[in-house]
Image (spheres, rainbow, N blue to C red):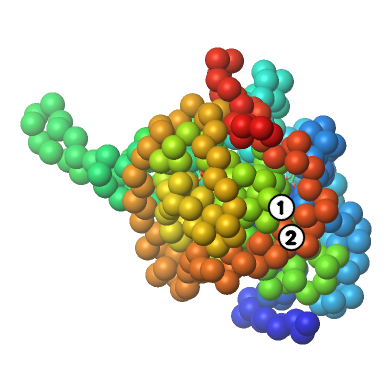
Amino acid sequence: MDLERKHVQTKKKIIVLGGDGFCGWPTSLHLSNMGHDVVIIDNLSRRNIDNELEAESLTPIQPMGTRLKVWEEVAGKKIDFINLDIAEEYDDLLKTLHTEKPDVIVHFAEQRSAPYSMKSPKHKRYTVNNNINTTHNVLCAIAESGLDIHLVHLGTMGVYGYGTAGMKIPEGYLDIEVKTETGERIEQQILYPTNPGSIYHMTKTQDQLLFHYYNKNDGLRITDLHQGIVWGTNTEETKLDERLINRFDYDGDYGTVLNRFLMQAAVGYPITVHGTGGQTRAFIHIQDTVRCIELAIENPPQIEERVMIFNQMTETHRVNDLAKLVSELSGGEIAYVSNPRKEAPENDLHVKNDLFLSKGLNPTTLEAGLLQEVTEVAQKYAYRADFSKIPAKSTWTKEQQPGIPEGE
Ligand code: NAD
Ligand code: USQ
């Protein structure tokens, strides 16, 4: 397969924090392919969590050294890698900023699974310590370095909660009108009130306050991307060589809903709908994730501008509709299992995503071809699946039951 080489007008030095992960790896390759100079920082904690859970990516991901060597062979481009714990090694992070002098930092480096964050007090505390400290250390180091670095952070649609009060969720800020003591009515914009549904999502709401503060106090230029659930596995760049393959999480903690349903149908496991499947969520394909990050980098906020917030999603779907769609395409059986989470059994969701559309995003929507591609990946590596890792066993409260289909 040929690599379609892309060229940017202004080559930038970009540090990708969490560049070994599901979103970070394809983003690093894409930005490198665009002609940017990319450095990955990652402490490989996600690979250690695989060891802890004894659950692996369905796809055989290669060690970082192999990934980078193959990329150099295939693309003729070099990506540097620094193994560093951003939550713990502040001095090394600051030193790295001084040596690398990045124009942009893309921040993916957080513990991103809601079920993992709810497993036990240890997991709750790890998620809070890791996520809040990575974000704060990055902000503190940028301010301390005195460098003009644009920070692009991967946030989540889950900061809003999933209720819409009959309106479209705006991009970060809510228009309000307040009545003053003298009876005058004044219009204002405030951060949309947060309503997290797990300890993980709660850390993302805290991130928002840290961004607000560092933007106000130190003038940091920050873009926060409120991303929906990512589905798919391959991008143009990861398809170039099997050794560049992206992660495919299917286990009960890290597997996200649509990829899980496609994998379950592909390996002949019942499609696990939590409750009645009335939950509506926002989605985006991994190819659009990397494109959105490119667009966010090309459209930085100006100095003095407030934190720029984009809703990074292309469509919304009800979980039960997705299950039915996958079942129709594959003939797979649906199992309505006990919902291990504490969440509204049903919700509507309407979301604005005008900002990315105005910057040139041409959305990849859920169509049969792409669903088929994920199914083929799942079938190809079905021999690596461990069925015992599929059920969602992490419960939000002690009283709840895990989401295990009958007879499994
Ligand atoms: P991931 O777990 O696959 O990748 C995160 C990477 O960050 C891992 O490689 C991990 O080793 C690294 N990391 C974590 N803590 C670190 C630390 N202290 N120091 C250095 N490296 C560290 O997750 P992902 O799916 O790629 O998600 C990336 C970001 O995107 C997350 O912040 C997540 O909140 C957000 N997001 C993901 C999705 C999704 O569906 N996957 C949807 C919306 C938002
Ligand atoms: N669900 C099922 N069956 C399953 C798995 C999930 O019915 O087998 C349901 C869940 O109960 C939930 C919905 O599907 O209602 C979504 O679950 P998910 O695991 O796909 O997504 P979530 O936990 O919200 O987290 C994922 C990413 C997270 C990101 C978030 C974006 O792991 O990093 O922030 O999606 S969002 O959902 O928009 O907040």
Q: Does residue 222 appear anywhere in the picture?
A: no
Give the labeled residue for mark 1.
Answer: 267
Disc 1 to disc 2: CB gap under 8 Å: yes
Residue at 13%, 26% in the rendered image: 181
Give the labeled residue for mark 2.
Answer: 379
The percent position of residue 361, horizontal first and vertical second, equals: 48, 70
* Ligand 2 within 8 Å, label 1 CB: no
**Amino acid at circle 2:** Gln
Instruction: Rate crowding at label 2 as few (under 14), some (14 to 19) or many (20 or more) other CA atoms within 10 Å.
Output: many
Q: Is residue 136 above or below residue 326?
A: above
The percent position of residue 335, horizontal first and vertical second, equals: 55, 40
User: Outermost residue, top direction?
Assistant: 399
Q: Is residue 332 above or below residue 86?
A: below
- Look at the image and tell me in which quarter the N terminus lies: bottom right
**Amino acid at circle 1:** Val
- Look at the image and tell me in which quarter the C terminus lies: top right
The image quarter in which residue 132 lies: top right
Residue at 34%, 44% in the rendered image: 348
Residue at 87%, 57% in the rendered image: 62
Residue at 65%, 67% in the rendered image: 373
The percent position of residue 129, horizontal first and vertical second, equals: 68, 28
